[in-house]
Image (cartoon, rainbow, N blue to C red):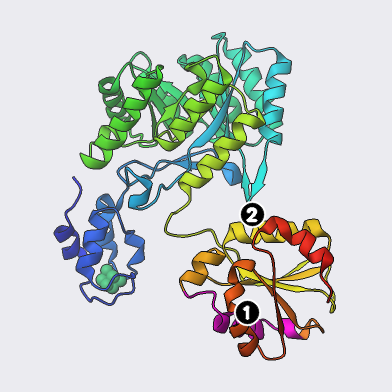
Amino acid sequence: MALTGIQIFKLLPKTNCGKCGIPTCLAFAMNLAAGKAELAACPFVSEESKAQLAEASAPPIRRVTIGSGVNAFKIGGETVMFRHEKRFENPTGIAVLVTDSMPHQEVAARIDRFNKNVYVRVGLKLHADALAIKSVSGNPAKFGALVETVIKATDSGLILMSENPEVLTAGLKICAARKPLIYAATKANAEAVAKLAKDNSCPVAVKGANLEEVAELTGILNKAGIQDIVIDSGARTVKQAFQDEIIIRGLALQKKFKPLGYPTIAFPCEMTDNPLKEALIASMFVAKYAGIIVLSDLKGEVLFPLLVERLNIFTDPQRPLATTPGIYEINNPNENSPVLITTNFSLTYFIVSGEIETSKVPSYLLIMDTEGLSVLTAWAAGKFGADLMAAFVNKSGIGNKVKNHKLIIPGYSASESGGLEEDLKGWEILVGPREGSHIPAYLRTLKL
Ligand code: SF4
């Protein structure tokens, strides 16, 4: 059973040193009990207390890793029902289905789209995470051949799908080192699949006819010494699968019901034949609350919106994506190039730098630390005012790189231009456009 805040407090050093970022040990203990703090934040907990506190600090939904090496991905580890309560921890893994009954060209085309549909947004690489390899034939040799084809074509995460332990064994012989998710242990095969998972140290999914059966199955796996479990409630109607996701998350978090304290896998690919409907269903499961979704294909028009949705939902709402402050050189600038300044909110940086690049005008871009806030928000919070901008420009050393000493500030900061001219001696302040899309035209017509 999870420990209460007072029980946790008794195991802390009680020095109220504040090194954990919280003023007192009691407040830290309360936050830890509520899942709002990490035990690792206190550097002074004894090893003995750590062992006792492990249960209290473990997330109510277990964190499970699928795959090995750089392409391994984590799912679960969730501690809240709603993102605004803290944050969602590990993004929903996106998998695409290939089966041993598909023509070779179709398998190759799906793997090709898996490998090629990679997008860069706000400096992050967005892509799908796994191939779900399904045995339809029930033939171990055929399944093994498909697994072989897949692992030669990609080093991604893998899900091996069959309810026949012999078929799973054939797949594992080829790819066990890649630590695939074994799908699935059922009432009929639980012991044999549990043995496979244990022998190969792989995570395993359970599939039940309903949540009661799922809870029984996780119990059987636990008894076999397996903890890295993923849950399939077995539902294949949208309504039932959605309800199951909510019930699993609610019982695990609010009732601390351990048998359902695992990430889930959902199959939009088995809920409709309509690709657009499938995308909508998948989008619902990204928000609530699938650990993995398996799609029938990864065409760009479906994958890209899902990846962006996932990025938005799994970004920590308390910590904006920020870019490293400093001087950025774009299009090989020289001493006669213009100097622009903006904030270190990642989206702002990527939009502004992208527009400067498009203009083909050699320029310097100064990125100032505003704790990841955008121009208007930073200005309203007093983090992008004339005095701070002046101090940053002087400290940056940009004055030694250019002769003209003209600084272009964002259009939304126009009200700071007068103050900046006073604070930044020797610089002329120019007010740039408000919208990033107007930057190329502005730079091309600029007379320095
Ligand atoms: S760092 Fe540890 S000892 Fe210090 S206040 Fe936080 S919980 Fe207490």
x, y percent for residue 378: 51, 69
Q: Quadrant of residue 230?
A: top left
Residue carrying label 1: 417
* Residue 23, label in figure: none
Identity of the residue drawn at 67% across and 40% down: 118
On screen, residue 394 above or below 349: below
* Picture quarter with the C terminus: bottom right
On screen, residue 284 versus residue 428, left or right, reads left
Identity of the residue drawn at 79% across and 69% down: 363
The residue segment tinted magenta is 382-399
Residue type, mark 2 in image: Gly
From the viewer's side, name the closer residue of 300 and 432: 432
From the viewer's side, name the closer residue of 413 and 375: 413
Magenta region includes residue 395: yes
Q: Quadrant of residue 248?
A: top left
Q: Quadrant of residue 29?
A: bottom left
Residue type, mark 1 in image: Ser
Magenta region includes residue 144: no
| Element class at badge 1 | helix
x, y percent for residue 194: 39, 26
On screen, residue 86 above or below 439: above
Identity of the residue drawn at 71% across and 23% down: 109
| Element class at badge 2 | loop
On screen, residue 96 versus residue 78, left or right, reads right
Mark 1 and mark 2: Cα distance apart in space: 30 Å
